[in-house]
């Protein structure tokens, strides 16, 4: 009885992991496969699809757009998250819970709703769709993530450190620069990286809000209509996968370092 | 008496419905080691933070070095603080921490380095300049916090339970170091503590706080021998309380009838403000009572009793003695010396006391 249940669970976990990761693993396999048809059996090793990427001009434009959008969105949402996190951890004000809740809402709001409603607002207001409209949408969905990451960084910060700096003659502003900022810096970097990653592969909002210029995911989607381009899309996917992995690992590393730091700071009294 | 460096006048502070400071008035004298002693939650930290400028009093007045501090921000006050958890900046070296407050003085590198070296020498941390602050032990962090505050030569150094996080041995060592440091630099220290032993051994004067008010300010000796009221007497050390009645005044002093000890004559001065017929409480410390051993000569003032309980502390033995003819038990502490046996429970003993050490409440 026990044994049967155990075997079933093992099989379940194996199936689950296979389902989760097999498609992702197929990406690099077919990216190096020397065939226009994405199917087994494999036909041999090639770098042609990566070479093709280098030669596709619109792809470069889309990549550049994506990098611009992701960088600006990451910076803006981190700046906004910084303010929200600081307010949430240091000050108490009327309606704080409600306001913090509202900031978090985009986390659970379907992106299609965000995309459509922003599209309506932007068009009604008479603005053009361009990279800025995509940035706007991305800031909206990234800010909750940044706020959460930065709130953790701030709440790990010992309040006495700020008071100690002020006691030693610093102003609120110089205290922020000399004490708070260096201590939450790993959190800030983690926030920027996460926001960057989210923005980089976001599709729905970018799809709704892009004008003539599109981002990489939207470009990839447009290429899927041409089966012949599929292998090069796989190659592109492989590159993106590698970049995302690197970014996420760095973000996690920085986040852990941030909490190590504040833990060390808090350990002052109880060594 | 020299000049007051801090003058507190009727300082009130409330947090919502909690009254943290209930009209605190006090003067702290230039160059003294002053302690704020009181039970948890009595408002010690709040008072210290009000002096430092981290809490605005609701009303009342704080003057430091003759200047009214109302509206003066913490970073402009001539005070520095040692925080309970030391608040060492974890992203800096020891030198970075100690020199933190010098940065805005723009002294130049050589002068800054010299001052840092000097401050570290003062707290016996020579050679620690480049150590990562995170790698320091609790005692070392404490010293860095001291050096960081003292390097700015404040008029007053404020310390909030600076020793409470240290283990017993290190705490005792730091107590005497802190005391010596204070004498050496001549800066006024205001120390918050809930440890009476710490307050008594280190301070020139101690203020006792209860429920947001200072009830007594005096030297440690006075505090111990002449507590202002029953509450202070109970808080500081231990004390026996016996029911007593004030009798008539005679030429030698005032008669007081103490339950279990009988009639004794006290200096009229120490009976004040009580008058004949008042029912009072007579307080006497355990070490002011003596168990008489057979070979020791008895005096006129003895009471008979029986040992009801006993606690042995190595150097001392505490006896609970039930006084003859009463339900009253008093604690007597005896130093254990070579020729004194530890008395067994149930022994009949005679105890002796000194009327001068009795305090009436
Ligand atoms: N920021 C605050 N908000 C609300 N109440 C506070 C605040 N600071 C202090 N109090 C309250 O004021 C009272 C005095 O607090 P305070 O910290 O001064 O006590 P304390 O004597 O330092 O106690 P302890 O020995 O435990 O440190 C307490 O009842 C405390 O709960
Ligand atoms: Mg306190």
Image (cartoon, coloured by chain):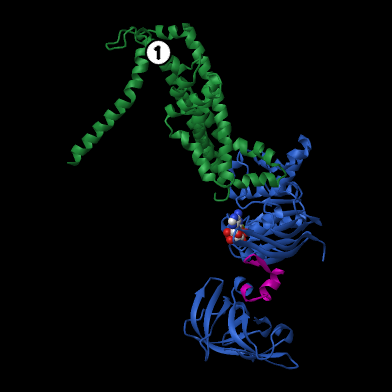
What residue do we see at 46% from left, 7% from top?
Answer: A56
Colour chain B is painted in: blue
Residue B179 visible to an observer of this rendering? no
| Disc 1 residue lies near ligand 1 with CB under 8 A | no
Q: Residues within 10 Å of mark 1 (few under 14, many from 20)?
A: many
Circle 1 SS class: helix
Residue B236 x %, y %: 62, 71
In the rendered image of the structure, the colour used to display chain A is green
Up-down relation of residue A264 to residue B322 (above or below)? above
Q: Nearer the viewer, residue B10 or A124?
A: A124
How many numbered tags mark residues here?
1
* In the foreground, B325 or A174: A174
> Residue B247 in the image: x percent, y percent?
67, 92
**In this figure, which residue is indicated by the disc labeled 1?**
A233
**Does the segment drawn in magenta span residue A181?**
no
Residue stretch rendered in magenta on the structure: B208-231
Within the magenta stretch, is there residue B222?
Answer: yes
Residue B6 as seen in the image, left or right of residue B338: right
* Residue A109 visible in this rendered orientation of the protein: yes
Q: Position of residue B301 (x, y in %)?
A: 63, 90
Q: Is A157 rendered above or below residue B70?
A: above
B289 vs B112, left or right, is left
Front one among A6 and B61: B61
User: Image height check: is B285 above or below A167?
Assistant: below
Q: Residue at x 37, y 7 (%)?
A: A46
Image coordinates of residue A257 in percent, x first then y, are 52, 35
């Amino acid at each position: 009885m026990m044994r049967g249940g155990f075997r079933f669970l093992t099989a379940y976990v194996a199936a689950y992991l296979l389902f989760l990761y097999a498609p992702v693993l197929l990406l690099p396999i077919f990216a190096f496969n020397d065939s226009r048809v994405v199917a087994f059996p494999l036909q041999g090793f090639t770098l042609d699809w990566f070479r093709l990427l280098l030669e596709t001009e619109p792809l470069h434009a889309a990549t550049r757009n994506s990098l611009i959008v992701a960088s600006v969105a990451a910076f803006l949402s981190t700046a906004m998250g910084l303010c929200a996190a600081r307010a949430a951890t240091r000050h108490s004000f009327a309606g704080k819970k409600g306001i913090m809740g509202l900031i978090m809402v985009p986390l659970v709001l379907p992106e299609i709703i965000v995309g459509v409603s922003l599209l309506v607002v932007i068009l009604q207001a008479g603005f053009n769709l361009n990279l800025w409209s995509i940035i706007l949408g991305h800031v909206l969905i990234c800010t909750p993530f940044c706020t959460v990451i930065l709130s953790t960084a701030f709440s790990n910060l010992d309040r006495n450190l700020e008071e100690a700096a002020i006691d030693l003659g610093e102003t609120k502003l110089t205290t922020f620069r000399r004490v708070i900022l260096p201590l939450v810096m790993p959190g800030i970097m983690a926030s920027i990286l996460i926001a960057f990653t989210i923005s980089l592969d976001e599709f729905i909002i970018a799809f709704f809000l892009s004008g003539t210029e599109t981002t990489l995911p939207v470009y990839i989607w447009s290429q899927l209509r041409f089966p012949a381009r599929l292998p090069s899309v796989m190659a592109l996917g492989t590159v993106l996968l590698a970049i995302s992995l690197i970014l996420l690992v760095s973000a996690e590393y920085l986040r852990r370092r941030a909490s190590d730091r504040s833990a060390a700071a808090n350990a002052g009294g109880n060594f | 008496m020299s000049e007051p460096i801090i003058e507190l006048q009727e300082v009130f502070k409330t947090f919502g419905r909690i009254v943290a400071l209930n009209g605190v008035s006090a003067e702290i004298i230039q160059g003294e080691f002053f302690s704020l002693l009181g039970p948890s939650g009595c408002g010690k930290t709040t008072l210290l933070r009000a002096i430092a400028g981290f809490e605005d009093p609701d009303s009342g007045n704080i003057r430091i070095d003759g200047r009214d501090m109302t509206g003066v921000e913490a970073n402009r006050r001539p005070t520095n603080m040692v925080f309970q958890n030391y608040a060492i900046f974890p992203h800096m070296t020891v030198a970075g921490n100690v020199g933190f407050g010098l940065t805005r003085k723009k002294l130049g590198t050589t002068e800054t380095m010299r001052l840092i070296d000097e401050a570290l020498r003062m707290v016996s941390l020579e050679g620690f300049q480049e150590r990562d602050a995170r790698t320091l032990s609790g005692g070392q962090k404490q010293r860095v916090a001291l050096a960081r505050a003292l390097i700015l030569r404040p008029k007053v150094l404020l310390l909030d339970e600076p020793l409470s996080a240290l283990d017993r041995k290190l705490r005792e060592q730091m107590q005497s170091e802190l005391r010596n440091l204070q004498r050496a630099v001549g800066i006024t220290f205001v120390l918050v503590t809930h440890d009476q032993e710490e307050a008594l051994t280190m301070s020139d004067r101690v203020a006792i706080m209860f429920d947001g008010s200072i009830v007594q300010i005096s030297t440690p000796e006075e505090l111990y021998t002449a507590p202002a009221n029953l509450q202070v007497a109970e808080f500081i050390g231990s004390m026996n309380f016996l029911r007593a009645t004030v009798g008539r005044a005679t030429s030698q002093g005032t008669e007081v009838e103490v339950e279990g000890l009988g009639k004794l004559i006290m200096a009229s001065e120490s009976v004040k403000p009580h008058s004949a017929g008042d029912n009072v409480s007579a307080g006497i410390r355990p070490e002011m009572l003596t168990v008489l051993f057979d070979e020791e000569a008895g005096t006129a003032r003895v009471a008979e009793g029986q040992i009801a309980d006993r606690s042995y502390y190595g150097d001392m033995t505490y006896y609970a003695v039930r006084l003859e003819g009463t339900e009253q038990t008093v604690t007597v502490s005896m130093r254990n010396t070579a020729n004194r046996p530890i008395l067994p429970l149930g022994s009949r003993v005679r105890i002796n006391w000194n009327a001068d050490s009795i305090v009436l409440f």
